[in-house]
Image (cartoon, helix red, strand yellow):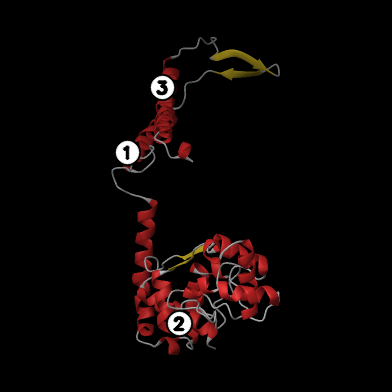
Amino acid sequence: MSDFTSNFWPVFITAISLLGIFGCALLLWRTSKIKVETSPDGTNGHVWDEDLREMNNPLPRWWVGMFVLTIIFALFYLSAYPGLGDYAGKLGWSQNGQYDQEVADANKALEPLYAKYTAMATEELAKNPDAKAIGERLFMNNCSQCHGSDAKGSRGFPNLADQDWIYGGSPEKIKETITGGRIGMMPPMAAAVGNAEDVKNVANYVLSLSGSMHDSGRAGLGKEKFTACAACHGVDGKGNQAIGAPNLSDKIWLHGAGEAAIIKRVNEGKVNQMPAQAGRLTDAQIHVLAAYVYGLSNK
């Protein structure tokens, strides 16, 4: 990857751009100095199909003028805008800056639309058809890539349409999650649990908590070893929303069900991150989006 981030490429792009422009200028100048001998009739002596003769007229002045103007324009453009490696240009334009400005202009134009929603409670807003339509668009543009267009998630991405919440499903918690994002981390617990057999026993005990298919003998042996996990998930395995520890006593599995999936999580741990939306969405947009998400599981 360092091959694509070194200083060589900006210099290479700058050299190619400038050499191309000055090469065209040199070609135009050189061709204007070349004198080709012509026949008395003004042709260069080439004949095709017995009677088609090639004339040797100079380039039209308007064409040469357009060529020169193109070269001048190219030099002006490259001095004003980015185009020469990492040179930012005299005007300071950037695609990120233009995007941010367009987003700011759009948000300002939409302020009157959102004004009537900011004063409404989340529960009330979740029932408003117009607010739901706006919230759905915000969800599709910013959340559906991970949680799916139906908000039911997939492996590693929580289902937002049920009542199972990792950090809590109250309006305040949903808004908090959208605004600041979340970083969920389960450390590798194999060393704390014991050996490989102990890990397998704990996995079966975890399966027993939700009534899933398990080895009852191993589950009995794994109950004592589960104390290493109880600090986060609780003695009863019902989780802790304050720290984002999932409930293990239901049949909802974020990273896959079954003995093998649980053993993998105990051995390897897991880090999941939801990016914060505060820098991308306004407070009013987050309020409407939170109401939409709240309404998915509170119909």
Work out whether residue 134 or residue 47 is closer to the camera in this orientation and state it: 134
User: What's the residue at 64%, 70% (across, down)?
Assistant: 201
Q: Which residue is mark 3?
A: 26
Q: Which residue is mark 2?
A: 291
In-image side of 40 versus 74 (left or right): right
Q: Which residue is mark 1?
A: 79
The three-letter code of the residue at mark 1 reads Ser
The nearer-to-camera label among 2 and 1 is 2
The three-letter code of the residue at mark 2 reads Ala
Q: Residue 44: where, in percent of width, then height? A: 56, 13
Residue 84 occupies quadrant = top left
Quadrant (top left/top right/bottom left/bottom right) for the C terminus: bottom right
Q: Residue 176: where, in percent of width, then height? A: 39, 76
- What is the CA distance from the residue labelled 1 to the residue labelled 3? 20 Å
* Helix, strand or loop under label 1: helix
Q: Residue 106: where, in percent of width, then height? A: 38, 68
- Of the image marks 3 and 2, the number of the one nearer the N terminus: 3
The three-letter code of the residue at mark 3 reads Leu
- What is the CA distance from the residue labelled 3 to the residue labelled 2? 65 Å
